[in-house]
Structure formats: structure tokens, C-alpha cells
Image (tube, grey):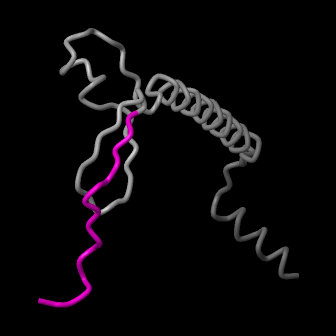
């Protein structure tokens, strides 16, 4: 086996939960902080409690707001692009081959 490739093992790693509960375990990290543990998780406690990890609702509303703004900006961009197409298109007079040749000859002279 190769030497010095394994991480240092901490036999007394302190795990701290957001609810205030702490316990020790073995880990490669000296301390760990978690948002939810067995002392406050609804599955283990039997209590119905709303658990909002990572502020899911706030995160969702933020993403929805950004998506709405992006949708509006793309619609505006599309409208601007279409208006430029309409304004740049000037109706062309249909010409016959003879008229085109005459025009080229007159430009050469």
C-alpha cells in the first residue's frame, strides 16, 4: 500500500445540528454542522413539522422571478428583432432580365 494517501481520521468529530443537538462520531473532518438530525427530523420524532432546508421556498421564488424576467427580456428582444426585419425590408420592384441588364450597362458607362 502507498504511504500518506489516506486522510487523517478524527475519532472524536463533533456533529452540531441547527436545532442545537450535538454528538460525536468518527470522520475525516474535525467538525460537521448539519441542518437536521435524528433529534429534530419529523420521521424520527413522529411530529409533523415543516422542514425548510436550504430555504427551498425562497430559492424557488427567486428562480421563478429570474425566469419571468428572462422570459420578458426574450420577448422584447424578439419584438425588436421582428420590427427591424419589417423596417429593413423595402418593397422591391420586380424587374425583368432585360431591365437588369440595361441597369448594369448604364452603371458601367
- Say which quarter of the image contains residue 11: bottom left
Q: State which quarter of the image contains the N terminus.
A: bottom left
Residue 97 location, quadrant? bottom right
Question: Residue 61 location, x and y as percent?
Answer: 52, 24
The quadrant in which residue 38 appears is top left
For the magenta stretch, what is the residue range?
Answer: 1-17
Q: Work out which residue is located at the far left of the displayed protein and give it.
A: 1
Residue sitting farthest toward the bottom: 2
Residue shown at the point (43%, 27%) measured from the top left: 56
Q: Relative to 63, does residue 91 appear above or below in the rendering? A: below
Residue at position x 68%, y 55% in the image: 95
> Quadrant where the C terminus lies?
bottom right
Q: Position of residue 43 (x, y in %)?
A: 19, 20
Q: From the top left corner, tell me how far across and down residue 72 is, in percent.
A: 63, 30
Q: Would you place residue 88 above or below residue 76 in this image?
A: below
Which residue is found at the position 17% from the left and 90% from the top? 2
Q: Decide whether residue 10 is among the magenta residues.
A: yes
Say if the magenta span includes residue 30.
no
Q: Which residue extends farthest top?
A: 48
Report the number of discs: 0
Q: Residue at x 76, y 69 (%)?
A: 102
Name the residue nearer the viewer: 28 or 53.
Answer: 28
* Side (left or right) of 96 relative to 51: right
Depth check: give the residue in front, 69 or 38.
Answer: 38
Q: Position of residue 20 (x, y in %)?
A: 42, 29
Position of residue 81 in the picture relative to residue 105 (left or right): left
Amino acid at each position: 500500500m502507498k504511504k500518506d494517501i489516506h486522510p487523517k481520521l478524527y475519532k472524536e468529530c463533533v456533529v452540531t445540528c441547527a436545532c442545537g443537538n450535538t454528538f460525536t462520531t468518527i470522520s475525516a473532518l474535525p467538525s460537521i454542522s448539519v441542518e437536521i438530525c435524528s433529534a429534530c427530523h419529523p420521521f424520527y420524532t413522529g411530529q409533523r413539522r415543516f422542514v425548510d432546508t436550504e430555504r427551498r421556498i425562497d430559492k424557488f421564488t427567486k428562480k421563478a422571478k429570474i425566469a419571468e424576467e428572462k422570459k420578458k427580456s426574450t420577448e422584447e428582444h424578439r419584438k425588436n428583432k421582428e420590427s427591424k426585419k419589417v423596417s429593413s425590408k423595402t418593397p422591391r420592384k420586380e424587374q425583368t432580365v432585360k431591365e437588369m441588364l440595361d441597369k448594369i450597362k448604364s452603371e458601367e458607362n
